[in-house]
Amino acid sequence: MKSIIKKSFFALCALVMLPFTLMYLMLSIMVNKDSLLSSFSQLLSLIPGKLGCYLRSGFYRFVMTSCAPNVLIGFATLFSQQDTEIDEGVYIGPQCNIGKCAIGKNTLLGSGVHIMSGKGQHNFSDPEKPIKDQGGVFTKVSVGENCWLGNGALVMANIGKGSVVAAGSVVIDDVPAGVIVGGNPAKVLRALHSK
């Protein structure tokens, strides 16, 4: 019974967000989708409380590449790329900043986690040219299912299934499955389960 009530509430929130969703879809025909998503994200991030979490998922499930209807997205969390995938049971804590990525089922992100669109977003090889004009490459970062990313983690590389990223860590290289990483740059501290 509890799961039916929860599903019904998520559906109701999607219905409440329908005007925003339709406005976004109409504007996305004329405006860059990433810029538009970023703008809508800034506005929707300010809705407080649990209701805000549900309303945000009611919007994002229709405007991202994919977003499960039962995702919880915390206060002041921003998204910058429309090509984002969020699987079932994901919790994204408050004040996160999420770029182009795929987040696996039942993964948890603490407060202030930043998932960047790879580590090549900015070039700075030409000293004669302003950095803002040198461009870069956006890469889709993958975070496996059943992971935990601690508060303030900065992620620029893939995280394997079932891994833990310690709070404040800076991930610049791919993390294998089933390990705990920590530090700057993040290094494997230990395996979670003996094989």
Image: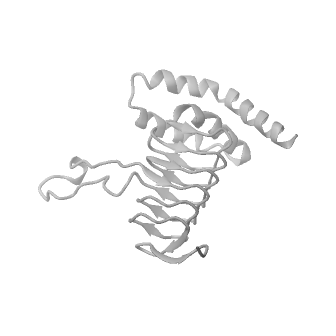
Q: As drawn, is 191 to the left or to the right of 30? A: right
Render colour scheme: one colour
Which residue occupies the extreme left position in the image? Answer: 128
Query: x, y percentage for residue 160?
Result: 50, 61
Residue situated in front as seen by the camera: 109 or 21? 109
Which residue occupies the extreme right position in the image? Answer: 1
Query: x, y percentage for residue 33?
Result: 42, 32
User: Which residue appears at 78% of the width and 33% of the height?
Assistant: 8
Residue situated in front as seen by the camera: 165 or 75? 165
Is residue 165 visible in the rendered image? The answer is no
- Using the image, determine if residue 66 lies above or below residue 123: above
Q: Quadrant of the C terminus?
A: bottom right
User: Which residue appears at 48% of the width and 70% of the height?
Assistant: 169
Q: As drawn, is 68 to the left or to the right of 83? A: right
- Using the image, determine if residue 84 lies above or below residue 167: above
Q: Quadrant of residue 46?
A: top right
Q: Quadrant of residue 35?
A: top left
User: Which residue appears at 83% of the width and 37% of the height?
Assistant: 5
Is residue 70 visible in the rendered image? The answer is yes
Residue situated in front as seen by the camera: 70 or 81? 70
Query: x, y percentage for residue 189?
Result: 51, 78
Q: How many numbered badges does the structure rendering display?
A: 0
